[in-house]
């Protein structure tokens, strides 16, 4: 069910997809164009219509696209005889079904409890009136006791998440010490992020047609032309994702904030209007989490479902809306090499450095280590010395040159690669 104003778009199709992702069988989709009603969100006539459908189809739950106040959900449940939830609660259900890691489960529980805190007083008051679907089991609590109990649980979960965040930060700093840049996958849910991640990282993380297949971060080293980088896949974006959910998943999305480049995935098979809407949502979410200003490469995915003319038309339309567009099909491994080249080009500039070093058992081990951790572009062995040219991030290049000096090396040049 969606109530909207005339200038607002209909989002029933996406709501139905969300409901199916949560395991529901949708029997009817209803829309009403009018101002919000303080009692029911919708008009009383529409409430009667829905009640009739509930009886005819043995409906177990009603789902609203609109955010419902506790009293509205209570009033609707009283008349229809079934529990009524809104879009936010539905997304929480999906997240709860898909969560597989400890962190994801904690984040979802945190979002649920924070939702309860904002509705605590009203839900306790309504629970005392009489039993209604979705409003049972709270009557025994005084408001302050209930509120304090939930607040205590929130604090406990936040402390656990802080410990996980500190551990992730430690891993991030270790990667930086190894001279690795980072790329974060981002995009609207179901755009094909995890499929692309599997192709680039040669992995097999779960993929599927449902929304929010990925809820936790997965990071792998990826080989790009002349560079190695850390690629991270994380939760997808969605329109009107509540700020409390963004906050709950901030520690996970933080990988995007600290990345050197964002790889933004776009589903090209959708209509231009839908692509524009989802792009707007993606950039809005990127800004909300504090990742605005990080360079972006855009992967226009699923081009195997379009003609060449349709692909070109979408590129022309989107050229001014999103940067550095590369057409790909992650499923069919089309355009992946070009995408890798584009990613390498737009990553944080490497520096090129050269040095000469005497050949000993120690320096042979050092040179082997360099081949694993930097992009060695040229090495020449002249008598008892080796002349080496390599590329790396500035911080890591300094580390390499420092070790070279320690082994008696002589620095010959040091400059930006100007990619």
Image: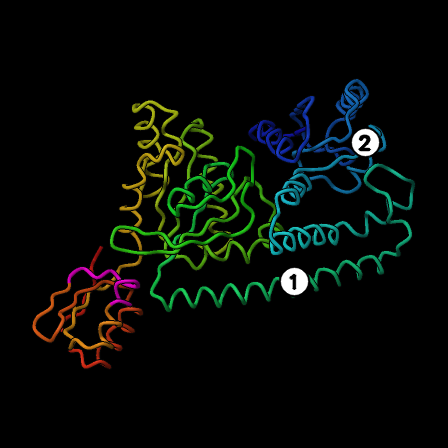
The residue at which mark 2 appears reads as 82
Q: Residue at x 50, y 36 (%)?
A: 190
Vertical side of 249 occupied by 87: above or below:
above
Find residue 265 and name its label: none
Regarding mark 1 in the picture, which secondary structure is present there? helix
Asked if residue 375 is among those painted magenta in the image, a careful observer would answer yes
The residue at which mark 1 appears reads as 158
User: 277 or 218, which is in the foreground?
Assistant: 218
User: 369 or 233, which is in the foreground?
Assistant: 369
Q: The magenta stretch spans which residues?
A: 368-378
Regarding mark 2 in the picture, which secondary structure is present there? loop
Asked if residue 30 is among those painted magenta in the image, a careful observer would answer no
- Judged left or right of residue 341, residue 26 is right
Q: Position of residue 102 (x, y in %)?
A: 62, 55
Vertical side of 157 occupied by 198: above or below:
above
Q: Residue at x 63, y 44 (%)?
A: 95
Q: Position of residue 184 (x, y in %)?
A: 42, 51
Q: Earlier in the sequence, mark 1 or mark 2?
A: 2
Q: Residue furthest top?
A: 56
């Amino acid at each position: 069910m969606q109530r909207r104003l005339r200038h607002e778009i209909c989002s029933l199709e996406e709501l139905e997809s969300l409901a199916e992702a949560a395991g529901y069988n949708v029997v009817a989709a209803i829309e009403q164009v009018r101002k919000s009603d303080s009692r029911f969100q919708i008009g009383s006539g529409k409430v009667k219509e829905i009640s009739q459908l509930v009886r005819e189809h043995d409906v177990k739950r009603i789902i609203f696209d609109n955010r419902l106040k506790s009293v509205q959900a209570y009033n609707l449940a009283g008349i229809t005889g079934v529990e009524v939830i809104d879009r936010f609660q539905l997304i929480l259900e999906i997240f709860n079904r898909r969560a597989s890691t400890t962190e994801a489960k904690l984040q979802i529980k945190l979002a649920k409890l924070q939702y309860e805190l904002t509705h605590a007083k009203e839900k306790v008051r309504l629970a005392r009136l009489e039993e209604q679907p979705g409003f049972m089991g709270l009557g025994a609590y005084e408001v302050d006791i209930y509120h304090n109990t939930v607040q205590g649980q929130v604090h406990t979960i936040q402390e656990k998440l802080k410990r996980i965040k500190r551990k992730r930060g430690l891993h991030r700093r270790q990667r930086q010490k190894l001279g690795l840049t980072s790329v974060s996958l981002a995009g609207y849910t179901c755009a094909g992020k995890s499929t692309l991640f599997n192709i680039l990282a040669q992995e097999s993380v779960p993929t599927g047609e449902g929304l929010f297949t990925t809820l936790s971060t997965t990071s792998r080293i990826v080989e790009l032309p002349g560079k190695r980088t850390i690629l991270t896949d994380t939760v997808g974006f969605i329109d009107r994702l509540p700020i409390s959910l963004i906050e709950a998943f901030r520690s996970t999305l933080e990988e995007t904030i600290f990345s050197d480049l964002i790889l933004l995935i776009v589903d090209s098979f959708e209509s231009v209007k839908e692509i524009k809407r989802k792009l707007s949502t993606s950039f809005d979410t990127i800004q909300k989490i504090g990742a605005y200003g990080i360079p972006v490469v855009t992967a226009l995915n699923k081009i195997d479902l379009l003609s060449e003319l349709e692909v070109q038309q979408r590129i022309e339309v989107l050229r001014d809306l999103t940067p550095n567009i590369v057409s790909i099909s992650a499923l069919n491994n089309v355009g992946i090499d070009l995408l890798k080249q584009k990613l390498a080009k737009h990553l944080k500039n490497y520096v090129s450095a050269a040095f000469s070093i005497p050949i000993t058992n120690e320096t042979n081990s050092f040179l082997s280590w360099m081949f694993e951790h930097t992009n060695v572009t040229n090495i020449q062995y002249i008598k008892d010395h080796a002349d080496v040219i390599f590329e790396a991030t500035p911080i890591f290049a300094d580390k390499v040159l420092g070790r070279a000096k320690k082994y008696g090396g002589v620095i010959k040049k040091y400059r930006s690669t100007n990619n």
